[in-house]
Image (cartoon, rainbow, N blue to C red):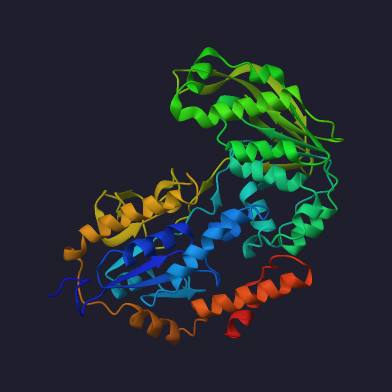
Amino acid sequence: MSIPGTEGQPLRVAIVGSGPGGFYAAEALLESGLQVEVDLIERLPVPFGLVRFGVAPDHAKLKSVTAVFTQIAEDPRLRFFGNVELGRDVSVRQLGAFYHAVIVATGAAGDRRLGIAGEHLPGVHAAGDFVGWYNGRPECADIQFDLDQEVAVVIGQGNVAIDVCRILASPIDALRRTDIAAHALDALSRSRLRHIHLVGRRGPAQAKCTPKELRELGTLPGWRVQVDAADLALNAVSEAELTQPANAQAARNVDILRGFAARPGDGERCLHLHFLRAPVALHGDGRVSGVELAVQALSGEAGAQQAGPTGESAWIDAGLVLRAVGYRGSPLPGLPFDAARGTLPHREGRITDTSGQPLPGWYASGWIKRGPSGVIGTNRADSADTVASLLADVAALDAPRAGRAGLHALLAERRARVVDFGGWRAIEKAEMERGRTFDKTAEKFVRIDDMLAAAAAA
């Protein structure tokens, strides 16, 4: 039996998911020096995952990485299978039989919940759904966000929370030429919001946002940033944390916040930043009208401080609440799942079964592997690590396998409407042409049928 990856016996690998984790895994395989055939399987007709549906429309530079992904996709050893869903069009068992190895890189599009009373009330949403709504994610296109309210509360203090606040407060003219979804631009243009409260349960030295994102909040025309000076009085342990080289980013954040407190600005509308406040209940009669908060205090050693209630409480009136407390992955039919972490269980990228033993030929990469952490580029090293594990296992992988020929035959039998990379480029071209009508970079399709119709032009 010849070893996969050698002359005449290519290593056939399927990658499920075409976001950063998927593309970087493909890149590592293509650069491995082995004979490979790589098939990228995506449940939507369009690629790029988090980059298309997660990056804010006013941060276009972050989307430039798609040029790298496109270059990877144009390698003749790679094929893109868009509009193909694991569990709907092909099962785990079938995919495993077609390929020597499968890398799951489906990301983490689900949201973590607060687990408090009132979370079910109308007017309470996951921040991820709001991000998907303004970025044109098909599942989110029809969600209604009530922007007739005057007060919104965003719970969380990572970059997603900051993005949400910035988009809510950005001048419409600053968004018009971006690729923001048309329905979101229209709704935001009629927004009546005058107060946005950003709430975090820990202190300013522990906020997880980046200085660049935080600083941008102070540049929004017509909005002033308000920070309670008492929240910026750090305890001794937090002050010690800021002196550590690894916390240089946190130190810059605190400097920015102190600048906000000293110079709040003179806008008519206000962005309030609250620290050491934990939501304990959402209240309302028929829809959310307020957030009950517990005042927190930090305790513990540097780098491991925990926030706990002081016994004091606080309240914020709110007609719209967006929770930005983290993403989580979703289970895939036929694969084990760590429900507590929202990830696939694994050892060094090898997916493990309920007894902790690796599933031969199955691997994970990206957020579904490690959870929602890091930036887009973080996925490159993560994917390389997973591919290193796969390559170490090559001699033990069964051969031969049908690879894409087997997948093609199955999808043809099921009359699946598969979108190849040429089809995606047709969608992209059509979106750019639609955008030119409104002097935008692009006008995204938000309906699957519209995407498929545009792809058919290829």
Foreground residue, 373 or 361? Answer: 373
Foreground residue, 387 or 41? Answer: 387
231 left or right of 326 in image: right
Quarter location, residue 22: bottom left
Residue, far top: 236
Foreground residue, 442 or 288? Answer: 442
Residue 49 visible: no
For the N terminus, which image quadrant?
bottom left
351 left or right of 268 in image: left
Residue 65 versus residue 232 in the image, above or below: below
81 left or right of 311 in image: left
Residue 119 drawn at (x, y percent): 66, 41
Residue, far left: 1
141 left or right of 43 in image: right
Count the numbered circles shown.
0
For the C terminus, which image quadrant?
bottom right
Quarter location, residue 267: top right
> Residue at (51%, 22%) from the top-left corner?
242
> Residue at (52%, 59%) from the top-left corner?
65
> Residue at (77%, 53%) from the top-left corner?
174
Residue 61 drawn at (x, y percent): 60, 54
Residue 98 versus residue 157 in the image, above or below: below
Quarter location, residue 335: bottom left
Residue 160 visible: yes
Foreground residue, 265 or 292? Answer: 265
Residue 265 versus residue 136 in the image, above or below: above
Residue 315 drawn at (x, y percent): 74, 27
Residue 235 drawn at (x, y percent): 56, 14
